[in-house]
Amino acid sequence: MAKTKTPFFSMGSRGSVGELITTQKRGRDTVIRQSPKPTDPYSLPQAYQRWIYKDYAYLWTQQTPAVKQQYATNGSRYHLTGFQYWLRIQLKAYPNLLRWYRLDAHSGATTLDSSPFKLDATITSATPIPARINGGYYFDGLNDKLTAAFPQGLQGSSPFTLQVFLYLPAGFAQATQGNIICIGQEIIHRSFTFWLSSLRNINIGWYGAGFATTLTIPLTTWANVAVTFNGLATLNLYYNGVFHSTYGIGAAIPNLTVGNLTIGGMPAIPRWLNATLDDIHIFSGIEPTQLIFNRAQRIYPR
């Protein structure tokens, strides 16, 4: 089926004929070429791109009519629909993504950050192994951690979402508490901390307070855990993409503006995690429950 915006055989032709031929502008010229097709649509890079596309396509459905109209107006200048222009902007900027450690992309002693900030994490002893989505890191409960700069755009009064896959080994051996993610200074009362107890319960702590949740992580199976904070007083916990429980903390989290992002270990307390982690996301704002669920179901290769 022809999908052209102008007559196909004109000098200003734009569009495609079926899945065979496409025309596009290149400088002052119109180029006719075979429609591009990915050589391996089921490769890992294609899977990541497909997931990102689906996330932002869903977010489009959550926009108000006024926002959609504004994108339609702006997109018309480029012969794009509002939805097409929305994707064009969002897929370039990832505006709500503060950190994304896929944990299967490495460069020397660092694991790469796939967010726009590109703040890679330094690896200390953690071991890369096969994981939920291609590759992750195993933390032995003794001295393994990842460390990166503090997430830009995140403050104690900022709504945010954390989401991570974790897998506990059959020989789970964690003497005390094990840090999953710590945002802030690696000392008590100077951070937001998401950790695992020696009894495998998820715990959440922040500036001067904290609690043990009722969520217990099983052994030898992948689990997805997410926490959202509304920037005011409420934390919501999700397990495998499904809402688990809510907790009131009474106020914003103070002093969450300095320090580091620490994953898997906290030497100063200490809290050494015994688990494998994969696909860590940190978002500004509260992610829709549907996207939290969708990310929790992802696996590669299938």
Image (cartoon, rainbow, N blue to C red):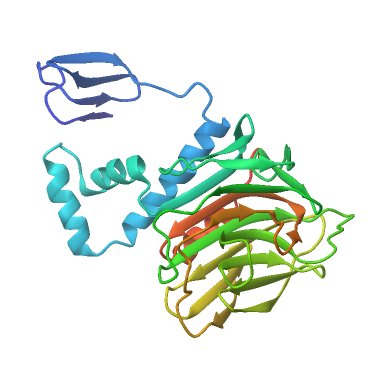
- Tell how many labels: 0
Residue at image position (20%, 18%) is 26
- Quarter of the view holding residue 123: top right
Of residues 220 and 213, the one drawn nearer to the viewer in this rendering: 213
Of residues 244 and 282, the one drawn nearer to the viewer in this rendering: 282
Outermost residue to the right: 171
- Counting from the top left corner in percent of width and height, residue 148 is at 55, 47
Is the residue 44 above or below the residue 99 in the image?
above
- Counting from the top left corner in percent of width and height, residue 93 is at 34, 44
- Counting from the top left corner in percent of width and height, residue 103 is at 62, 41
Quarter of the picture containing the N terminus is top left
Q: Is residue 12 left or right of residue 15?
A: left
Is the residue 252 above or below the residue 257 in the image?
below
Quarter of the picture containing the C terminus is top right
Is the residue 96 above or below the residue 36 in the image?
below
- Counting from the top left corner in percent of width and height, residue 256 is at 48, 66
- Quarter of the view holding residue 28: top left
Residue at image position (13%, 16%) is 9
Q: Is residue 75 left or right of residue 237?
A: left
- Quarter of the view holding residue 262: bottom right
